[in-house]
Amino acid sequence: MALTTAHPSLLSQRILALEESQTIAMAKRGRELAAQGKDVINLSFGEPDFETPVHIREAAKQAIDDGWSHYPPVAGYPELRKAVSDKFKNENGLAYTPEQVVVSTGAKQSIANALLCLVNPGDEVLVLGPYWVSYLELVKLCEGVPVVVSGTVDQGFKPTAAQLEAAITSRTKLLLYSAPSNPAGAVFAPAEMQELVEMLHRHPQIVVIADEIYEHILFEGKHQSIGAYPGMIDRTVTVNGLSKAFAMTGYRLGYMGAPLEIAKACDKMQGQITSGANSVAQRAAITALTTSLAPTLEMSRRFRIRRDACVAALQQISGLKVYVPHAAFYLFPDVSAYLGKSTPGGDKVETSLDLCLYLLQHFYISLVPGEAFGDPRCIRLSFAAEDGMLAKAMERFAAGLASLR
């Protein structure tokens, strides 16, 4: 079919309005430079650089040998749904039965399922900022209206309950947030979480989607699930997965616990889109969730060492505001002191995207601009990389900033 002025594109408005993930876009640009022979250090992806623990890999191999190669149930194997239910109960104090668990192809699909099943056109979804890159686009795909409520670096990147309450209207349907957070690694203190819960009790119409994918990469304190607070389990969708805690990103395995009506709706939705998640990955996930967390805790310990080294390096750079993350494997420094400066070639660095592109093209480090996360004053860098590579990246980052005038 030839395209005409009256029909400029065969594509839907839905896909034309969808923004590309900036994390994926920056990683792609980095790979392109690397293919040209440049020594690019990629700190843009949210992926542990550790290997999946051996006993989980062995479980995956055994699953293949045992013939787990047929269609699984849409919501997941019963044994895995029970393992998730037990994990929620024992680790998080969450009373989700196996029937309230839905296993999906990654936590991203779990979030998408929940939004598709809950959001009507025009519904408002409160999103805590800075936010994970896909939240806003998923809300828009569901024809909802994202309402971002942000916390600044001086607030530890955590908006207050009062800020959130001020944004609630008669159209507010959901609250969506990650805890611990991506990109900042922020964690609500117990008192802050209590204030959030008390505010939500004043607005019982609001359903919560809590993305807890980074719960085990925690450097201080104990993880708190909002659904474990009195009166919250019946209005909370808790999303988690295997990617971060078990270094299983390629297995593509996530899950949710939800009120039964929502869980059944997500089962129905998933049945028309992907059906059940990968059978071999599910068998490996059973092993991951029912055996020792020792490899996960060791990985978290090593991430903390890297965090401390990177924070120390960044704190030596004049003008940066450096928040020390309590969790995850990201740093989200405020680089606003460098915006508006010029490169040696005379180009103006107006935005954090400009800065990231400059650092990639001339200093060969791949970072993600803060615009992607709702805070254009910042950039995100991942410290999920080998220690020597991180040290080199910090040197390049400092040199790149120092080159601006």
Image (spheres, helix red, strand yellow):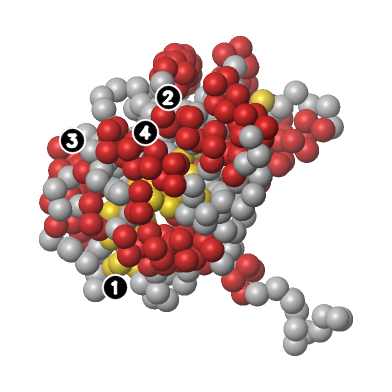
Eye-nearest disc, 4 or 3: 4
| Residue pointed to by mark 1 | 171
Q: Where is residue 144 in the image (x, y as percent from the top left)?
A: 42, 69
Check contact, mark 2 vs mark 1: CB within 8 A.
Answer: no
Q: Which residue is drawn at 61% across and 53% down?
A: 71
**Residue 291: image tag:** 2
Instruction: Work out how far the residue at label 3 is from the one at label 2, CA to CA, in angstroms.
Output: 29 Å
Dot 3 crowding, Cα within 10 Å, few <14, some 14–19, many 20+: few
| Residue pointed to by mark 4 | 215
Dot 4 crowding, Cα within 10 Å, few <14, some 14–19, many 20+: many
Q: Give the secondary structure at mark 3.
A: helix
Quadrant including the C terminus: top right
Eye-nearest disc, 4 or 2: 2
Label 4 or label 2, whichever comes before in sequence order: 4
On the question of residue 147 being in view, the answer is: no
Instruction: Work out how far the residue at label 4 is from the one at label 2, CA to CA, in angstroms.
Output: 17 Å
| Residue pointed to by mark 3 | 190
Eye-nearest disc, 1 or 4: 4
Q: What residue type is labelled 2?
A: Thr
